[in-house]
Image (tube, rainbow, N blue to C red):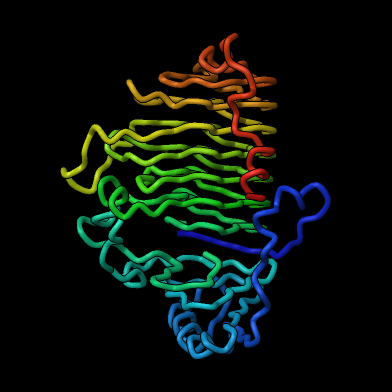
Amino acid sequence: MAAVAVAVGVASGEEEAAAARCARRPRPRPHSVTISEFGAVGDGVTVNTLPFQNAIFYLRSFADKGGAQLYVPRGRWLTGSFNLTSHLTIFLEKDAVIIGAKEVSEWPIVEPLPSYGQGIDLPGARHRSLINGHNVTDVVITDSCSNMCIEDSSISVAHDAISLKSGWDNYGITIGRPASDIHISRVDLQASLGAALAFGSEMSGGISDIHVDHLNIHGSSRGILFKTAPGRGGYIRDVVISDVQMEDVNVAIKFTGDWSTHPDNHFDPSALPMINRITLKNMVGTNISVAGVLSGINGDPFTNICLSNISFSLADSTQSSSWSCSNISGYSELVFPEPCPDLHHSSSNSSICFSLLTYHALAAA
């Protein structure tokens, strides 16, 4: 089951600078309808797949007339998969929650994405996602996306809550469409069996220029996860994550180069990913079981991984060491518990780190 809620807010003060990439907010749509006009009931029990599908089919007629808005009032709106259309805004009122239905029949089986080769949950085909878009433009939805924002939202799921991806192995390398220039801010995340915020493991088209700030992560197996494997190729680079609060998280920070699932046997094991210039700073966590597990790839280490101003309070039942590192290098300062020696060599300094200042320089370019 997946639940998504969105509340609208406007950044101010010190957040205005950090939200430079999101200054171009969606234009007001000249046409608007409410999902309840199509028979939807927000009681958390009624399945509203058909009302969502019918509403968006109706709103397609306004695509060449300035676009349209689908307004979702407060309530718990149970639905299966539905498709987006171009020039559409889905506006959720405060306390409106879209919930994925459990019935398998509500999740059509469709062809895999060209950058993946096959579905992840099925051999060959795949189940269509909760909110699906194909060949659409001017929509606010991330796989191989660029110049987008995720703001003022609450997401509660079993698997990864927010996952940035860009294609799987040789299929993603061939398509070569990166995920880049993404800003995530003021988001509440819960992922009971997965990661609140994940990068990869399907990242073969590349992931870069990502700014994340003001996250509240709770009740999750992993807080922040970077995952890849030999055969992926591609890169994850120039990422800054700041101002994060965590509570009741098993592993707060995890990097792994051993997420070795593949769509088929045609991948090239010598296609090694590059993980470089990742900065995590200004984080506080309580009831954390493991502070961090940072494991790169033998012969292909993850580099310039920077930790700054981080304090994790470990759970009383924690028996293992707070940090574990291998094939990793970078820099750390003001981190508790003290991280691995790999991150505080005397020869390293903060100049190797991708910083918020660097991000703003890229934003202004």
Residue pictured at 36% horizontal, 35% vertical = 273
Please state which of residues 179 and 49 is positioned toward the viewer in this rendering: 179
Please state which of residues 266 and 105 is positioned toward the viewer in this rendering: 266
Q: Position of residue 200 (x, y in %)?
A: 41, 44
| On screen, residue 354 above or below 107 | above
Please state which of residues 302 and 326 is positioned toward the viewer in this rendering: 302
Q: Residue 73 vs residue 205: left or right? A: right
Q: How many marks?
A: 0
Q: Indicate the quadrant where residue 67 lies.
A: bottom right
- The residue most toward the right is 13
| On screen, residue 218 above or below 104 | above
Q: Position of residue 48 (x, y in %)?
A: 48, 78
Q: Residue 93 vs residue 289: left or right? A: right
Q: Position of residue 353 (x, y in %)?
A: 60, 28
Please state which of residues 349 and 335 is positioned toward the viewer in this rendering: 349
- The residue most toward the top is 346
Q: Is residue 245 visible?
A: no
- The residue most toward the left is 265
Q: Is residue 76 visible?
A: yes
Residue pictured at 31% horizontal, 40% vertical = 232
Q: Indicate the quadrant where residue 82 lies.
A: bottom left
- The residue most toward the front is 365
Q: Position of residue 95 (x, y in %)?
A: 67, 66
Residue pictured at 20% horizontal, 55% vertical = 123
Quadrant (top left/top right/bottom left/bottom right) for the N terminus: bottom left
Residue pictured at 42% horizontal, 69% vertical = 132
